Image (spheres, coloured by chain):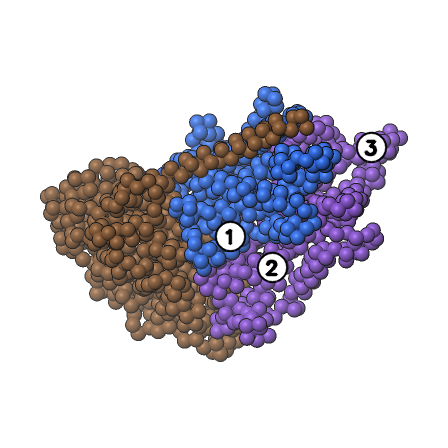
Amino acid sequence: MRNGGSTLRKLTGVLGTLLALSLVAAACGGDDSSTSGGTAGTSAGTNGSSPTTEESGAVGTTVATTGEAAESISIVLGSEPTSLDPHLVDDGGERAVNNNIYETLLFRTADGVLEPGLAVALPTQVDELTWEFSLREGVTFHDGTPFDSAAVVASIERMVRLIGAETTDNAGYFSPLARAEAVDPMTVRVLTSAPDGLLPSRMNWLRIVSADAAASDDITDAPNGTGPYRFVSREVGVAIELERNDAYWGAEPDVDAITFGFVPEAGTRIAGVQSGAYDLMVNLSANDREAVPNAAQVAGIEHPILILNTVEGITADVKVRQALNLAVDKQAIVDAIYGGGATVDAGQVLSETILGFNDSLEAFPYDPDQAKQLLEEAGVAGQTIQIIGESGRWVNDGDLLEAVASYWTAAGLQVDLQILEFSEWLDVFFDTESQPDVLFVSTSLDLLDPDKAATSIHSMNGLASGNDDAELAAMIDEARSELDANRRDELYQQIMASANEKAYFVWLVNTADIYGLGDRVTWTPRIDGLLLVKEMSVSG
Amino acid sequence: MTAPDGYTAQHADEDEALHQEEALQGRPYELAVVQHGGLFRDLISDKLGIASFIFLVTLIAAAALAPWIAPESPTQGNLSNAFASPVWHGGTWRNPVGTDWQGYDLLSRLLYGARTSLIIGVLVVVLAGTFGVLIGLLAGYKGGRADRWLMGWVDVQISFPGLLLAMLLIALVGGSVLSVTIILAINGWMVYARMTRGVVLSVRERPFVEAAEMMGCRPRRVVFHHILPNLSTPLVTLAVLEFARIILAEAALSFLGLGIQYPTVSWGLDIARAGDHELFGNQWLIIYPGLLLSLTVLSVNLLSSWLRVAADPQEREKRFASRASGTVSGAAGGGGAGL
Amino acid sequence: MGRYIARRLVQGLVVILGVSIFVFVITRVVGDPVKFMLPLSASAEERDARREVLGLNDSIPIQFGRFAGDLAHLDLGESTYVRGEPALDVVFDYLPRTIQLVALGMLLAVVGSIPLGVLASRKPGGLVDRVLTTLSLIGLSMPQFFLGYILLIAFTVKLQWFESGPGPWRTHLVLPALCMALPAIGRLAIVVRSAMIDELNTQYVKVARAKGLSQRRILGVHALRNAGIPYVTLLGWEMIRALAGYSVVVESVFNWPGLGFMAKTAIQHQDFYLIQAIVLVVAVIVVLLNISIDIAYKALDPRVKLS
């Protein structure tokens, strides 16, 4: 008892120390967030000196009520950019942020039609391998450097160099590029290593950096483009702030400042839009459309599809492949799984607006009886069919596969659906030696062109092809090197028809991009999936 | 128990070590054991105990019989029958608890989920328990260098960040009942080794064992006749608590997407699926598997506290004494620690 | 004392080395970050070339030599997910937010558990006691992610009092911290309660009562200190578990961008370098916390010898 008091003191001391440690740490962290809050305030041109941290939504409201012109927008992405270097990574978060900072020689309209950008007109062809661009006058980078042919040449050569060094993930988009040369300060020639009908589309994808920046192999920390917004600050894991570039060459954007947030789970993004913390969210599930003030939908570029093994196994028989198509109620999948946020593919992996779309093709009807009959005719009723899939990479992919498995079971097959870890699925995907009966993949029409879909899953030489159709592969090679757009269109139509006739795939849907919008934002989403804030407007 | 380690400092001796293990399980929780008698009579008289017992027996039976009593296959969906209401909301008996967005029968999924949880729980406890007890016996019985090395191994491994490593391993090898079981067992054997060693050391110091050894009893005989009987009570108690912890661990891994995968059904996976899909919609799809999982763990914890008291004469006497004096002390399991 | 701490530090070093080697070997044998770096359409040649650039084509002993050499300079390589950033920098970008979460969670746990435990012990077996003890038991039987969803549905979706995701602590951190605290409150309150009961039944407290000492003084001075040792120990363990395990789950449910959240991402992308850095930093913190708990033990109870 005598030392009771001292023990108590010690206890309090120890407890205190443990807590104090935690609190110090917490306070340090707290400083971080209040600093960033302060920055947000400053960039929005509002009470930057205010010591209290306000969320960006609240900042916007304050602005609106005071009637100042300053308008900021808060956009929440599903993942943080893995780099802010415009040439290194291939990642949606990076594109969402950087396409407001950097620009390209050619732009696209919201419907996907190429139009002049940093170049004043579409390129002219000098010969099979050479394209000439005339550049826009009076454009400067955010640091004041003028935009000219040196920047374009340096950007292209940087990409070529990074591809050679194997450090960029974008080789797939730009490998045909050979080099570039400046004709005069406002004229550039781009050279390819082989005839390449896609070059204009590629020049819609290659962001132009300044000649100085191009010398470096990693420019994550110093974004410096010609775009309508300039980089302000970044708190890793939490937010990236941009502000309007007042020296922008184009029309003055309506929105003054942008905050990008990153939240992987859709539910949390939705809650943020509901509360006004975010004005715009990406990847809204169609089922949750009612949960946000406004939802905007546009056809996306993703086509989840099942690649059938036409060489061996149960799917080698065309009747079985047709049956597999007939057995699936695509419209029910669109309605139930995607809540209307998708459209049924018309028996091809392309959507209507894409070159090569064949409008004489139609989706296989949902006809379970005929499917059963075909399976019986083929003598495979009751047999096992293996599907290799994954879950979580694409919108509702796991749910889609489970629904397909249910339909095929109903049609009389034993379905062995394996939902693998993404890395295991990749192993199957990259394995060119053995091919499962059915491989799930989602094909994205990058560059709004059929080229990638054709070469990767239609051609027998493709990474994930299920057929050994030499004739089809030859057609695809021919289409690749064709420069004339009409002829390309024709060739791709034939390719689509041929694949459909032999039922090389089970065509499913084209998933839509759905955005959740708060009350303040007006915006029409773009077919290429870019989030160009200069096209958005914000009201009080 | 599941607590991380680092409490070797306060072990004045091995008996105290054992005592500390017990202390970790939390202090006694009130259980009204009315009178001595058979174990079963004891149980009957403990309302919470009997309720959890009945719940668990029903769950185990239902899980075992799932293939026969489940209305449908848990992975046979039907999009035209999505979101069917449960019976008490005007649904039909075809899907008594309703269906989810795939048209999966929810009752069937709950039953098959129970199966996965219980199978993994039992397998991990058996695997980790067997290995841990063997190591503990070896360390305690051999003593000396073997003891130091083995317990050093235990000390090191128990300080590993278990959940992180389990996630990493499953991400690398893929999630299945087998991989989750093995990885959780690798992660969980150390507590058994610790406890067994403590018991061995304390028993060996007792005069009758010393006498038996001096008289030339074979080590095997000593182990089987003297040590194992003393081990059974704390072992069963620990195993039950670990069972609760493993069920939670499996659910947590599956929830994170780094555990059980389709077509195997897991409550943790179903909660994650529903959480992604229906946070703003049919939230009962999150609530039902979550409630069932919580109830299962709660029942195991309640049962283990009852077991601790009922199977341990000392505890029983304490209980009796404290009841007499009007105070309470019973055992609240310390399970539920996740990983 | 000094020797004891030195020995524990050495033991801690063994743990840290053990974890590092374990993670190194299994990731190098089974994993491949390149799979996740390049787009799906990249060819096998491109992938192999990238592996070459990263040095992943070398034999494992050579890679290990390089790893050990770099580790001596505290260089854990560059993250492959957060492209080009030194892995340790990424860890220190995310760690403060996990510490914030754990600190607030533990603060709530302490603030909640002591009054609850004391309250329950005042009339053992009474209604308050039974309710509180049952609630504690329910709290510690509930999976944290489910508890998290319940909180999220109630306070974010329905009532809209709090938000989730990254943001200021008052609106965004309270719920995850509560989710972290509730099970801990259950476990800690039980310790307080039993220690109090034991203490209130001892002879000297009865004497103190008879002498007319106030209830408050008896509770505060005599009884609470009895609970100190197990309480501080358990609190230390709660911190360790919160940092090294629960944070992954809680941060995933609430999208709180802390280290646990990053750990899940790094594991999903097989970012060896980042995983290695996370596990290393977590292991160091756990070792230090463990030693602190032992020292706290010693400080609280002079009878304990640190052997």
Chain B colour?
A: purple
Q: For residue C293, what is the image quadrant? A: top right
Circle on res. C148: 1
Residue A442 visible at all: no
Residue occupied by mark 3: B206
Indicate the chain on which mark 3 is placed.
Answer: B
Q: Residue at x 65, y 65 (%)?
A: B66
- Judged from the image, the secondary structure of the residue bearing numbered disc 1 is helix
Q: Residues within 10 Å of mark 2 (few under 14, many from 20)?
A: some
Residue occupied by mark 2: B292
Q: Position of residue B211 (x, y in %)?
A: 87, 31
Quadrant position of the N terminus of chain A in the picture: top right
Q: Position of residue A140 (x, y in %)?
A: 16, 43
Any idea which chain is the blue one in this picture?
Answer: C
**Is residue A329 left or right of A114 when viewed as pictured?**
right
Chain A colour?
A: brown
Indicate the chain on which mark 2 is placed.
Answer: B
Identify residue type, mark 2: Leu
Disc 1 versus disc 2: distance between alpha carbons?
Answer: 16 Å
Please tell me which residue lies in front, A321 or A218: A218
Q: Position of residue B268 (x, y in %)?
A: 55, 55
Identify residue type, mark 3: Arg
User: Could you tell which of marks 2 and 3 lies nearer the N-terminus?
Assistant: 3
The residue most toward the front is C212
| Above or below, comparing residue A226 to residue A288 in the picture | above
Please tell me which residue lies in front, A66 or B202: A66
Identify residue type, mark 1: Gly
